[in-house]
Amino acid sequence: MAETNSGSKFFISSLPTNTDLDLTGFEALTWVQVKGVGSHGETGVNTNIVSYDTWDTEFVQKAKGTSNAGDPEVELARIAADAGQLLMRTAGDHFNKNNYSFKIEKNDAPSGGTPTFVYNRGLVAGPRTPNGRNEDFVLEMFTLALQQQQIIDEAAA
């Protein structure tokens, strides 16, 4: 059955994680929930397709090139004192060159089971403030520059 993002949660690791992690490594981290998430951009692998044409071929030769783990934008309704948002601002500081880990907890747990967890790791840039009109919420935008392939731990009964 298709699910919505309503009720999902977004977390950042309490300390930097500058090396690749496996599922056990992600699960061992201390997580801080980031409140006020309105939108979280696309994650996953985007692989470049390179091509080369030669005089003696009718069709272009193609191969997979390098991959990008994603650069999603995270939009937050600004909550000045939220611990997760404070950590995002610290991680996003221009002079902070550390990677942090991220966890999305989906709201899809079967009765008595565990939900889906999506784990990523990378840099944080921001915040940017879109400002807006008189009746807009005060928002902050962060870009996550993900550095390794995400790990998905599927919901289980």
Image (cartoon, rainbow, N blue to C red):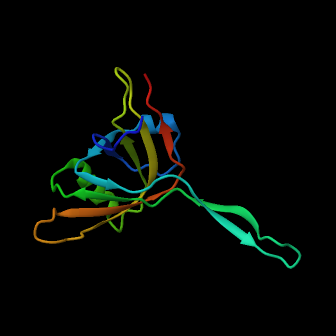
Q: Is residue 92 left or right of residue 121?
A: left
Q: Look at the image and tell me in which quarter the N terminus lies.
A: top left
Towards the viewer: 70 or 84: 70
Residue 14 higher or lower than 138, as above or below: above
Q: Residue furthest bottom?
A: 55
**Is residue 103 among what the camera can see?**
yes
Residue 3 higher or lower than 82, as above or below: above
Q: Quadrant of residue 119?
A: top left
Towards the viewer: 43 or 88: 43
Residue 125 is situated, as x and y percent measured from the top left of the image, at 36, 64
- For the image, the number of numbered tags is 0
Q: Look at the image and tell me in which quarter the C terminus lies.
A: top left
Q: Residue furthest right?
A: 56
Residue 10 is situated, as x and y percent measured from the top left of the image, at 32, 45
Residue 132 is situated, as x and y percent measured from the top left of the image, at 19, 71
Residue depicted at 39% across the width and 38% down the height:
29
Residue depicted at 17% across the width and 54% down the height:
79
Residue 26 higher or lower than 140, as above or below: above
Q: Quadrant of residue 131?
A: bottom left
Towards the viewer: 85 or 42: 42
Residue 134 is situated, as x and y percent measured from the top left of the image, at 10, 70
**Is residue 13 among what the camera can see?**
no
